[in-house]
Image: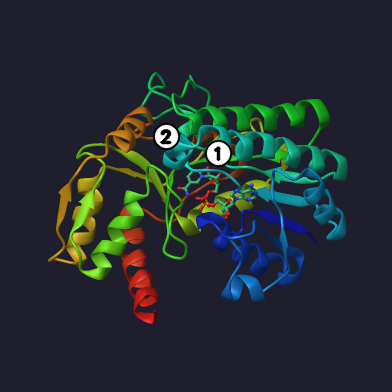
Amino acid sequence: MKNILVIGSTGQIGSELTAELRARYGGANVVAGYIPGAEPKGELAESGPSAIADVTNAEQLASIVKEHHIDTIYNLAALLSVVAEQKPRLAWKIGIDGLWNVLEVARENNCAVFTPSSIGSFGPNTPHELTPQDTIQRPKTIYGVSKVTTELLSDYYHTKYGVDTRSVRFPGLISYVTPPGGGTTDYAVDIFYAAVRGEKFVCPIAEGTRMDMMYMPDALRAAIELMEADPAKLIHRNGFNVTAMSFPPEKIFAEIKKRCPDFEMEYQVDPLKQAIAESWPDSLDDTAAREEWGWRPNFGIGAMTRDMLEKLSARLLDK
Ligand code: NAD
């Protein structure tokens, strides 16, 4: 039996990961950590315990871990790439000072820790095609700098103190439950909201700019399956390349238009987002994840688009 704390449980990933973990391990065994102003609502609030868990407050984390006998922490607290560029010091405080608190509490209480890295941990001089697992990581954004640091600090706590740290480098995540929090790949979610609402989509990323993406059900499985993997088989730890698809804006537009023939899109490229997008890989090589813990995505672009349109339409109709 696991006792799990999800830090950042009300964000794009956390809101769905907490529900999935509760379905697997029992509602009472998964604590939804949140910060004031981002409280759990609805099903998330009702399906299990919750607690204020601010990563910048080490004592608060320690008391939750002790009170709930936590043995596994999913640490999702971060500022995403575009927001972080506007608030670099805060991004570091949450992403790295906060991570340090999480790792310390994990060391003292023998917890396993999952802290996501990102395709943002790569930079302009990383090989862009089939980006290898082990390669050059010299990102130019504060988001990227903090993700590389996240990987290194998590590895350090594993080798120095034996803390069971594991992570994946998530690509852009596409989902319909909670909107994304200010990343470079948000357009791949926003385009579905425009299509379902019957609006023209204004795309901030230029035609031809490919980035890796993944549908949320695959992302949840990646996180949970990695945390359940046999440690003896893990050569890498923080973090594994994982991907499910890679596309430029015109490809996802064409895929949606097959099902929404009147849908229209125009480009108004945002220079900040475009510069970040161009510095990231075009496609990741996730062989290490496949070999070391059996990673396989279930959703390609066609299946994801079908499911997204269906589920998002139902959700928006409900409101
Ligand atoms: P999000 O912005 O939707 O959610 C972040 C959560 O962190 C929010 O619930 C927020 O309330 C919480 N938070 C903020 N400050 C906090 C603090 N001081 N203490 C505790 N919690 C705090 O982000 P997300 O998309 O769910 O991302 C989660 C993780 O996954 C992040 O590390 C992110 O970098 C990574 N990631 C996300 C994507 C993506 O496409 N969504 C891709 C790659 C990596």
Q: Nearer the viewer, residue 227 or 32?
A: 32
Q: Nearer the viewer, residue 31 or 135?
A: 31
Return the disc, 2 or 1, that comes first in the chain's sequence: 2
Dot 1 surroundings within 10 Å: few (below 14), some, or many (20 or more)? many
Instruction: Please give the name of the residue rendered at 55% of the width and 62% of the height, measured from the top-left corner.
Output: 16
Above or below residue 167? Residue 315 is below
Residue 81 spot, x, y in % from top left: 45, 39
- Residue density around tag 2, few if under 14, some if 14–19, many if 20 or more, within 10 Å: many
On screen, residue 266 above or below 166: below
Q: Is residue 114 visible?
A: yes
Q: Which residue is mark 1?
A: 289
- Residue shown at 18% from the left, 60% from the top: 200
Which numbered dot is residue 185?
none
In this rendering, the answer to whether 241 lies above or below 224 is: above
Q: Determine the secondary structure under disc 1.
A: helix
Quadrant in which the C terminus appears: bottom left
Q: Amino acid at mark 1?
A: Ala
Please state the horizontal and vertical placement of residue 1, each as a whole percent of the image. Answer: 80, 61
The reply, left or right, for residue 27 in relation to residue 40 is: right
Image x and y of residue 185, in percent: 37, 45
Quick check: 171 left or right of 54? left
Q: Picture quarter containing residue 83?
A: top left
Residue under label 2, please give it. 284
The residue tagged with tag 2: helix, strand or loop? loop
Question: CA–CA distance between discs 2 and 1?
Answer: 11 Å
